[in-house]
Image: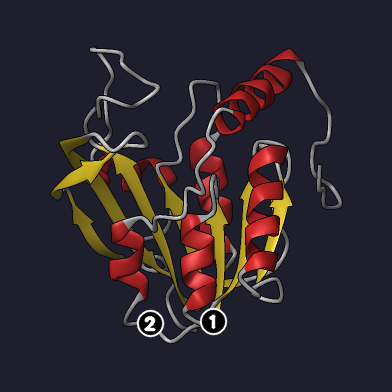
Amino acid sequence: MDTSPGQDTSRNAADDEAERFWERHYGSRRGRGERVNPLLAETAAPLRPGTALDLGCGGGGDALWLARHGWRVTAVDISATAVGRVRERARELGLESRVDAQRHDLSRSFPGGTFDLVSAQYFHTPFALPRARILRTAARALRPGGLLLIVDHGSTAPWSWNQDPDAHYPTPAEIAAGLHLDPGQWPVLRAAMPRRRATGPAGETATVTDNVLLLRRAPR
């Protein structure tokens, strides 16, 4: 695990269970998993490339897309399998100088540096996670004028690991309120719940809702 000074590096049974879950999840996926999340592409396409942080990079589709479009990307995940695959694929594509894949349990450690864009795409887990604290840390890692894009599930897809019929999906307004960030310093640029036709890992399709929150760190 990558760590930074002053961060909590202790482990417990819940941490180990979360790591095993995501190792099994990505270990069972044989495909490249290189499709970019469409709301990230929509947000990043008009931007001038800079430095980006991909929280929970998974198969690496977002990180590799950003690198192909000129960004320097720090891609992090709790799964060593996921991180290893992102590194390998970046090398195969000649993007190793633009993709720094790191293993982090974000409840324990956070990558160093400052960023022009932080992306948290479907940053959900079945385990206890201090999500609001992590996203606040991400917001504070933005450079002045930088963007934090949070895209959450707003509905349950047939292929989701979470099939709880009573699951509550916080709205963008609820997510923003839970971050407890000064709106004068991190104003909301977009809060929306668009619907789209999505394709699952086995090629199945369904209409899903995304909860989208886009914040900008105020220029100094």
Q: Point out residue 14 in the picture as x, y percentages from the top left corner.
A: 68, 16
The 10 Å Cα crowd at callout 1, few under 14, some 14 to 19, many 20 or more, is some
Question: 12 or 136, which lies in front?
Answer: 12
Which residue is depicted at the point 53% across and 65% down?
64
Q: What residue is pinned by disc 1?
A: 50
Q: Distance between the residues labelled 1 and 2?
A: 9 Å
Which residue is depicted at the point 80% across and 44% down?
7
Q: Point out residue 191 in the picture as x, y percentages from the top left corner.
A: 22, 55
Which residue is depicted at the point 34% across and 26% down?
160
Please identify the quadrant where the N terminus is shown.
top right
User: In the rendered structure, which amino acid carries the disc numbered 1?
Assistant: Gly
The 10 Å Cα crowd at callout 2, few under 14, some 14 to 19, many 20 or more, is few
Label placed on residue 47: 2
Q: Point out residue 36 in the picture as x, y percentages from the top left corner.
A: 39, 58
In the displayed orientation, state which residue is furthest to the right: 5
Picture quadrant where residue 177 is located? top left
Q: What element carries label 2?
A: loop
The number of callouts visible is 2
Label placed on residue 176: none
For residue 36, above or below residue 106: below
For residue 31, above or below residue 13: below
- Contact between marks 1 and 2 (CB within 8 A): the answer is yes
User: In the rendered structure, which amino acid carries the disc numbered 2?
Assistant: Leu
